[in-house]
Amino acid sequence: MKNLIGKKAPDFKANGVKNNKIIKNFSLKKFYKNKYIILFFYPKDFTFICPTELYSLQDNIDKFKIRNVQVIAISTDSEYSHLEWLKIKKENGGIMGIEYPILSDINKIISYNYGVLSGSIKFNNNNLIVKGELIAYRGLFFIDKLGIIRHLLINDFNISRNIYEILRIIDSWQYYEKYGELCPANWKKGNKTINIYKKNSFFKKYYKK
């Protein structure tokens, strides 16, 4: 799998849906210098874990907005599939009320470039051979305002993600950007940090009984 940490996020143009309307040629570049990005891959529309994750993002969307983060979801379904799913109420298995963009990676290229495409593809005597489903694993990428990937998480299909851990990751990076101090294990806003420019500062205040 590609190592994308610290590298420019692969850009793309994709169709999708937002506010119950089809959108065309959506690109990450429009947010560079202005917003951070959470790019959130999920396997399929009309499934079981996926809507719980999408709603968890929506339920906490104000927390992302306060942090100046644009949430973007994406799967290998078509934009028309997304649109139909958005018409169905939550209690019926739909995702009605989701406000952030949901993009279509119908050609699988975006999932491949981000290293989250399941299955395998190869040629044998000019015949295309595919093993497994070519759909996205549960991948998540935190991209800074320069378009650099600072965090990634990839789960198998049956393992859901924790939205509050995503917010903690964002807080950690933004604190480092602002103050130049490092955030130790299990750090949360308000906890002690590490200033590497002050001699022994971390060991004195962090390990103090």
Image: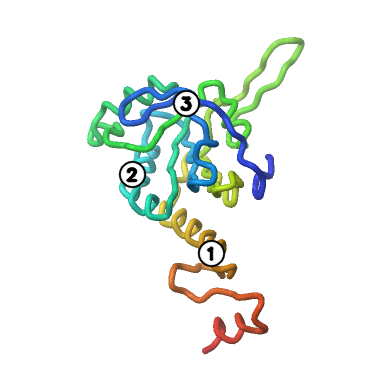
Q: Earlier in the sequence, mark 2 or mark 1?
A: 2
Q: Earlier in the sequence, mark 1 or mark 3?
A: 3
Left or right of 132 in this view: 71:
left
Q: Which residue is mark 1?
A: 178
Q: Which residue is mark 2?
A: 58
Q: Residue farthest to the front? A: 33
Q: Residues within 10 Å of mark 3 (few under 14, many from 20)?
A: many
Residue 104 screen position, x and y as percent = 47, 26
Q: Earlier in the sequence, mark 2 or mark 3?
A: 2
Question: Residue at position x 23%, y 36% from top?
Answer: 91
Q: Residues within 10 Å of mark 1 (few under 14, many from 20)?
A: few
- The mark lying in front, picked from 2 and 1, is 1
Give the SS element for disc 2.
Answer: helix
Quarter occupied by the N terminus: top right
Q: Separation of disc 2 and disc 3 at Cα?
A: 19 Å
Q: Separation of disc 2 and disc 1 at Cα?
A: 27 Å
Q: Which residue is mark 3?
A: 104
Residue type, numbered disc 2: Gln
Corner quadrant of residue 51: top left
Residue type, numbered disc 1: Lys
Q: Separation of disc 1 and disc 3 at Cα?
A: 34 Å
Q: How is the image coloured?
A: rainbow
Q: Residue farthest to the top? A: 126
Residue 11 screen position, x and y as percent = 59, 33
Question: Residue at position x 33%, y 42% from top?
Answer: 55
